[in-house]
Image (cartoon, rainbow, N blue to C red):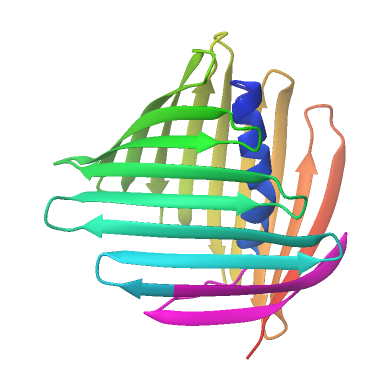
Amino acid sequence: MTRPSTTLRKLMLLSIPVLAFTMIMPDIAFSKDRARSGSYQTNRGGGTFDASSSRERGSSERSFNRTNDRGTTSSQQSRTRNREDGTGTSTRSHTTAGGKTVTETRSGQKTETGYESDWSRTGPKGKTVTGSATTTKRENGYDRTGTWTNEDGKTGTYTGNTTRTDQGIVSEQSRTNANGKTITNTTTGTRTDNGYTQTTTRNGQQGTSTKTVDVTHSEDGTTRDVTLTTAGGKSKSWSGTIKVNP
C-alpha cells in the first residue's frame, strides 16, 4: 500500500482488522440463505462471531459480526448484478467496536476485455476518496489500472496484475501517490495439503518488509500463523484460530 493521503491511509487501516480476521475464516459457501457462528482465539484474546447471507437472482446480502471484550465489530455488504446489460453495484460498510465507520460504494460495467468500475470510500470523519479502475482479463489472470482523488484534489495511480499458477497465484501491485513516491507489493500464494501459504514482499520508502501467512485447516478449526519482518530487520509473529459451530 502507498501512503497516498491521510484520509486514504485511515480508510485502508480501518479495513485491516476485518480483512485479517476474514483470512482465518474457513471457506463458507453461502447458498440462498445461510447463517454461521463460532468462536476465535488470537494472541490478544478471543471472542465469538456470526455471519449470515441471503441471495436471490441478481442480488445478494451478507453481514458479519465479531464480538470480544472491546465490543462488537460489524460489516455489511450488498450487491446487485444485471446479466443482460453487464452492470453491477456493491455497497459495503465496516463499523469498529469504537463506533468508527467506513463505507464504500462501487459500480461497474462489463466490457469485451474485462470491466470498468468507479468507487467511493468515506471515512469516519466524513472525508471521501473517489477512484476508477479498468480490469483486463487474461487467460491465466487479469491486469488492473486505476486512479484515485481525495477531497483536496490530490491524485494517485495504481497498477496491478494477478496470475494463476499450478501452485496458486502471484499478485503484483504498484501505487504512486501525488508526490511521485511509489510502493510495490508482490504476493505469492501457494496451496498446501491442508491449507495455503502466502508471502508478501513490500518495497516502500522505508525499505523492504516481508510478511508470511500460513493457513492450516483441521478438525479443530482453521489456524493462521503470521510472521512479519520489517524493513529494519525486526521480526514478530502472531497466530489465530477460528472454529465454526456445527
From what the image shows, is residue 79 above or below residue 205?
A: below
Q: Is residue 79 visible?
A: yes
**Which residue appears at 60% of the width and 25% of the height?**
2
Using residue 158 as the reference point, say whether residue 48 is left or right of it: right
Residue 100 appears at what percent x and percent y? 70, 45
Q: Above or below — where is 70 with respect to 177?
A: below
- Residue pictured at 48% horizontal, 41% vertical: 171
Q: Quadrant of the C terminus?
A: bottom right
**Does 47 sit left or right of 124 as displayed?**
right
Q: Quadrant of residue 21?
A: bottom right
Residue 59 lies in quadrant: bottom left
Total numbered circles: 0
Q: In the depicted view, which residue is nearer to us: 47 or 189?
A: 47
Helix, strand or loop: magenta stretch? strand
Asked whether residue 201 appears in the rendered view, the answer is no
For the view shown, which residue lies furthest in the top direction? 179
Give the residue displayed 75% in from the left and 54% down from the top: 226
Identify the magenta region.
25-53
Point out residue 44 in the picture as x, y percentages from the top left corner.
88, 59
Q: Position of residue 202 (x, y in %)?
A: 64, 32
Whether the magenta-drawn stretch holds residue 139 is answered as no
| Residue plotted at (70% across, 44% down) | 211
The residue at the far bottom in this view is 246
Find residue 159 and report its horizontal and vertical position in percent: 42, 28
Residue 37 belongs to magenta span: yes
Q: Quadrant of residue 119?
A: top left
The relative height of residue 241 versus residue 33 in the rendered view (above or below) is above
